[in-house]
Structure formats: structure tokens, C-alpha cells
Amino acid sequence: MHTATSSKLGYTHKTQDQSHKTYRWWKALCGVALANMGLWAWVMTTSQSQHNTFYVQATLSGIYVFVCAFRSFYPRIDLERYCLHDTPLSSVALGRTLATIAEICFSIQCAIIIYGLSLAVDSQIMGYVAYSIVPIIVIAQLFCWHATLTLNHFWHSLEEMAWVLMLILTAGCFVAGFFYLSSDYKLLMIIGFVSCLASIWIMLAIDIPMYLSRKSESQHHHNHLSIQNRMHDAVMRRVHTNDWAIWKQEVLWLTSYFTVGVWLSIGMIVIEFQ
């Protein structure tokens, strides 16, 4: 009897410790989100930039920054319908809609930067890349929505591949810019290239294998349901969990997305090629 009680207490303590890890990570995300909103506001009020795209970039970045903050406060895992807080604000459909808007805004920011780079180095090819960025990410969003509604992780892996394609094209532009622009812009090109390379590595080495593994494990696709029922499931169904064993699989990409991704978005506000 004593042994059974001790075992139960040990299990309870371990479970509480695991949930504490989850909430410590979440609190860190929230702290960074608040700091990022403050950083965006500071850039907006102190920047002396007069370039034509400043307010366009600032608006796009503002949407991205605030959506990332919202997603930090209410994290979720779409296909499994996991959420850290059991509230309507954790709705998968709501979160996915906001994420779609934010990621398209981010892609427009990138397209503006690459288009400016193409003018600076007088490259028609870079111009074509700039015009291709947003359509590629729109396709990625369609893949993501299809995954969310059908619960099929294979479409998530296709979404990631679309992002990889966009990042490869963008990285190539930064490499060319490094050799053609003046020394004032070389550090900027290096930062852009390294950011693309790191994102590509996360997607190819971690995210895509994870999604393909989950696809092979999951048998609960919604292909037999109507679109209306699939959407109702995405809107209403939530599985509350604070289990670190579940959330730790998402930590790397969520943390990098809501930190480095946001900083890059804010940085693009003030970039100007002359």
C-alpha cells in the first residue's frame, strides 16, 4: 500500500513538473511578445526613414507582430486541436485565419525587399523572384488549410516545401546582393542569407520529418466529412493540454517563429536600398 501511494505521488509530482515546464516556456513567449510589440512601436515613433515603402512595411509588420503576439498568448497545435488555454480564443479556425493573414503580410514584406534589391542591382531575375514570393506563400496557406480541415499532415509537409522554395529563391538574391552591392549592405545580405539558411534547416531537418511521421501515425483524416462539418470541427473542437511531452515537439519552430521571425519583420520596416 505504501509503495503504491509513493508511486502515485511520484507520478503526480512528475506530471506537475512537466506542466511547469510548459508554462515557463509559455510565459517566456508572452514576455517576448510584449517586448516585440514595444519594439515595433519604438521603431514607428523614432524612425527618421523617408523611403516610399516605410508605412507599407510598418503596417504589414504591425499585423505580423500583433498576430504573433496573439498566437504566443494562445498557442495551439492545429491538426491535433491541442491548445494550452481552453477558451474560444484558442479556436483552431480563428488562429489559422489570423496566421494566414500574418504570413501573407510577411511574404509581401519579403517581396518588397527583394524588389528593392532587384532595382538596386538592376536584376530582372530578382524582379521575377520578388513577384513569385507572394503566390508561393498563398499556395502554402492553401496547403496548410487543407491539412487543418482534413487532419492530414502530408499537406503540412507540402506547405513547408513551399516555404523552402521561397527561402531558397530569397537566399539566392541575398548572395547576389552581397557581391553586387556596396559594403554598407554586405552585413544585411549576410543576415538575410543566414536567416534563410537556418529556416530551411529547421523545415527540412525537423518540421517536415515530424509531419511525415505524424501522418504515418494518424488514421483520423476527415476526408469523409463535408466542408461544413470540417470547418465546424476546426472552429469548435479543442483539446486542452499542458503536457510538456506534447508541446516540446513544437518549441523550436514556435519559439524561432515568434522571436527571430518577428525581429526580421520589424527590421524590414527600415531597410532601404539606394
Image (tube, rainbow, N blue to C red):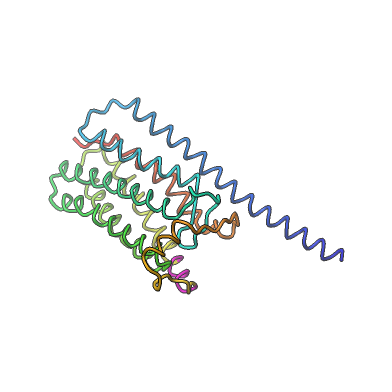
Please tell me which residue is depicted at 29% across the width and 34% down the height of the picture: 270
**Which quadrant of the view contains residue 265?**
top left
* Residue 63 horizontal/vertical position (percent): 35, 41
* Residue 221 horizontal/vertical position (percent): 43, 71
Name the side, left or right, on which 264 lies relative to 78: left
Give whichever of 194, 76 is nearer the camera.
76
Query: In the rendered structure, does residue 250 fall within the stretch colored magenta?
Result: no
Query: In the rendered structure, does residue 212 fall within the stretch colored magenta?
Result: yes
Q: Residue furthest right?
A: 2
Q: Quadrant of the C terminus?
A: top left
- Number of numbered tags placed on the structure image: 0
Question: Main structural element of the magenta stretch: helix, strand or loop?
Answer: helix
Please tell me which residue is depicted at 40% across the width and 53% down the height of the picture: 96
256 w.r.t. 208: above or below: above
* Residue 229 horizontal/vertical position (percent): 41, 64
Give whichever of 6, 209 is nearer the camera.
6
133 w.r.t. 33: above or below: below
* Residue 23 horizontal/vertical position (percent): 59, 47
Name the side, left or right, on which 219 lies relative to 52: right
Q: Quadrant of the N terminus?
A: bottom right
Please tell me which residue is depicted at 68% across the width and 57% down the height of the picture: 15
Residues drawn in magenta: 210-217
**Which quadrant of the view contains residue 225?**
bottom left
